[in-house]
Amino acid sequence: MTSFRFIHTADLHLDTPFAGMSGINDRLRRHLQESTFAAFGDLVDLAVSEEVDFIVISGDIYDASESSLRAQLRLKEAWDKLGLHGIPVYVIHGNHDPLSSSRQRFVYPDHVTVFGSRVESATAVRRKDGLPVAVVSGISYPTSSVTENTSLQFHRDPSSSLYHIALLHANVDGQEGHDVYSPCSLSDLKKSGYDYWALGHIHKRQILCEAPWVVYPGNIQGRSMKETGPKGCYLVDVNDNKETTLHFYELDHVRWTETELSIEHMTSENKCKEMLEDRLESLRSESGGRTTIVRLNFTGRGPLHSMLQSGRDSNELLQELQRQETERISPGSASILDSVIWPASFKVNTGLDYDRSLLQEENSFLGELLRLSERYQNRSDDLNLDLDANAIINDALASLMDHRVLRGYVQDLGEKERRELLQQATEMAISLLVDEEPRGGEVS
């Protein structure tokens, strides 16, 4: 066995359009649209500087099957640079860039291996001496929807003592938030005999197992508030004894994040604005020069609850913060674009300043409402206790199940989202019952 190193990456989603971002100026929008290319460029530079022996890419190079010419030109540029440095690339296609795509304009160079719609294998060598070090196997999506368990096609070559790497674009154990394409279980992967499963499709970085290694590197650039935190790739070192070490490298040029502020000490609208500005400046000092898109999550109870729940007032406050940040990045300003902290939206999870325990003791509709909400929020997920509370919640949602669009939304709600919606509904009901006028939710 010979030591070697490789990069595991996935879900590049080159040329993501970042549609739906409101209020941003053209300069920032161009920066967002360039971010996936910039992150990929840094990945190529990392491969060169760290002298990796090869790269594996586990699907979704493009953001759409009808990939733009710009995306394909930038990809060719990256392939050419890697080729100049003698770095091979092993690629599979996923649901966003299936083999059936009709807009592949360029032929892949010889140092880029693309696996087909059935499991194929290739032998990877160490660059400095050409010694074989690994068997790399992979399978691509023939179309955008693959519902069979393709992991069952992988079988380790019993005659080879080389390190075995499997490339698979799949949803392991039905993880929420992603389509259940190429569904499989962790048990399926463990039984295959492979040493390292290089996964793609799930954009959250996670190591599911270390014996064998089962790894999601996540995507290289966050694309929405659903993809918060550092994004990048894994540099993988394998020693002579097949002992494997992973190092995560951040590549994202735009980071999505959420920060929480309590309204407990916000005594006025002006105080609220000051605290928001202070928080944005704190994020700027911690950003390391990286552009940050932030959602501001208001929590707690206080006198500004009604103002924040008001769609008009909270929207005007958000627009004012965005106007101030726009001035920093306007043409002719001395600021650096990469230091921008963009307030994208507000999430309001606040409540009136009242004694909840006293209201819960009341023999009234409001008291019963609070007791029911408390029972649902505190029920055991594992034992599924308090079926009465759960039944009432499901009954309240029943009318939505007749609506095609809303039905899909309700069915996709996870337990966390259900609890958040219940809490918001409870606060709105309390406000209504004490003659307040809420219109809560998220402002963007």
Image (tube, grey):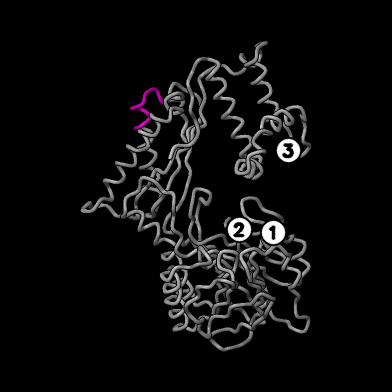
In 3D space, how far apart are the residues under numbered discs 3 and 2 (Cα atoms)?
Answer: 24 Å
Mark 1: secondary structure:
loop
Left or right of 112 on screen, residue 377 = right
Quadrant that contains the N terminus: bottom right
In 3D space, how far apart are the residues under numbered discs 2 and 1 (Cα atoms)?
Answer: 9 Å
Choose between 45 and 140: the one closer to the eye. Answer: 140
Task: Please say if 377 is above or below 189.
Answer: above
- Seen at 30% across and 41% down, the residue is 323
Q: What residue type is labelled 3?
A: Asp
Q: Are marks 2 and 1 in contact (CB under 8 Å)?
A: yes
Q: Are marks 3 and 2 in contact (CB under 8 Å)?
A: no
Locate residue 404: give its quadrant: top right
Q: What residue type is labelled 2?
A: Ile
Q: What residue type is labelled 1?
A: Val
- Seen at 56% across and 25% down, the residue is 427
Left or right of 223 on screen, residue 186 = right
Q: Can residue 234 be seen in this view?
A: no
**Of label 2 and label 1, which has the lower sequence position?**
1
Task: Measuring from the top left, give residue 169's x and y in whole percent.
Answer: 63, 65
Badge 1 is on which residue?
A: 172
Task: Please say if 148 is above or below 125.
Answer: above
Mark 2: secondary structure:
loop
**The label number, if any, that marks residue 381 in the structure image:** 3
Task: Measuring from the top left, give residue 237's x and y in whole percent.
Answer: 59, 72
Badge 2 is on which residue?
A: 202
Magenta range: 266-273
**Of label 3 and label 1, which has the lower sequence position?**
1
